[in-house]
Amino acid sequence: MQVQPVDRLSYQPLIDAALREDLGSAGDVTTNSVVLPDSVITARIVCRQDGVLAGLPVALDVFGTYEPDIVIEPLRRDGEVVRAGDCVAALEGPARAILTCERTALNFLIRLSGIASATRRAVEAVGPHKARIACTRKTTPGLRLIEKYAVRAGGGVNHRFGLFDGVLIKDNHIVAAGGLAAAVARVRAAVGHMTKVEVECDTLAQVELALDVGVDAILLDNMTPDDITIAVDLVAGRALTEASGGITPQSVGDYAATGVDLISLGWLTHSVTGLDIGLDV
């Protein structure tokens, strides 16, 4: 599948910060001691296991940021299924620069490809059902933009990007406001008509109340598939339904079978296992 790329200006600060973190004030003392200044090498970025590729432009821009003289040839695209042994990019240029950038570049590529791969497995697990797989705000601080991009590369969709682009009234908001109806009323008075309002519901009684006061979406939190089936029937298309909480890779198909519109999974980003990818000189 093809995925809309992230603008380089948006992630360039992440590359700059990652390089500063790794180089410190002394630079790569190992490479600069071992490798001659005029040494030139060719290298390949190779997958060690099957998965879905994500973050290749980010990884390759690490090399280009550090040393513009490196010749970079991407061989695959983000969103593509890759197999163990596949070469996804080729590099040629100053040996010191390529070796210095290796880990920083791979850190981006390994993590983002791991997110895309986990997302693709979840998307495939929901099978023929209409449910879409969504990520959450449980992202690595500072990396939300590219981690949510990796979810899209895996075939998922993005939930809100932050506290600024949508209203999600959660259980603690409801307690602090003195009740669900009061919370919704205050939000409707405070935000514009273009802002979606979603309410987290833990019980079927809360679902009924949310429908009575009028919301755009209902998050069915930590409910069983049986309860969500009842909730979806109760909503009957009057609001978007989202299942979240306690959903595992093994149970995601059962939740999709309830007829829910969205399934949001925090583990896509907060506890993902990276895809094994290496650089071979």
Image: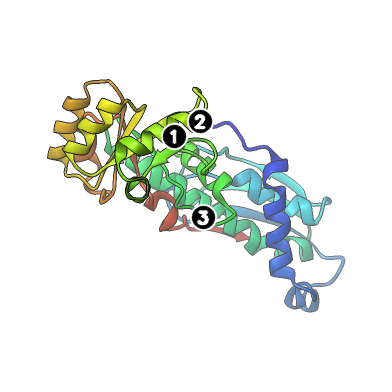
Nearer the observer, 59 or 10:
10
Report whether residue 213 is seen: yes
Circles 1, 2 touching at the beta carbon (< 8 Å): yes
Side (left or right) of 171 relative to 278: left
Q: Quadrant of residue 182?
A: top left
Q: Which residue is mark 1?
A: 187
Q: Could you tell me the amino acid type at mark 2?
A: Val
Q: Quadrant of the C terminus?
A: bottom right
Badge 1 crowding class, 10 Å Cα cut-off, few under 14, some 14 to 19, many 20 or more, is some
- For mark 2, does the 10 Å Cα neighbourhood hold few (<14), some (14 to 19), or many (20 or more) residues? few
Residue 41 is situated, as x and y percent measured from the top left of the image, at 75, 60
Q: Secondary structure at mark 3?
A: helix
Tell me which numbered mark, 1 or 3, is placed earlier along the sequence.
3
Kind of residue indicated by mark 1: Val
Q: Which residue is mark 3?
A: 111
**In which quadrant of the rendered view does residue 145 lie?**
top right
Q: Nearer the viewer, residue 56 or 157?
A: 157
Q: Which residue is mark 2?
A: 191
Choose between 232 and 11: the one closer to the eye: 232
Question: Could you tell me how far apart the alpha carbons at marks 1 and 3 are, in whole angstroms?
Answer: 37 Å
Viewer can see residue 128: no
**Which kind of residue does numbered mark 3 sit on?**
Arg
**Residue 212, image x and y in percent?**
25, 26
Horizontal and vertical percent for residue 128? 25, 27
Residue extending farthest to the right is 38
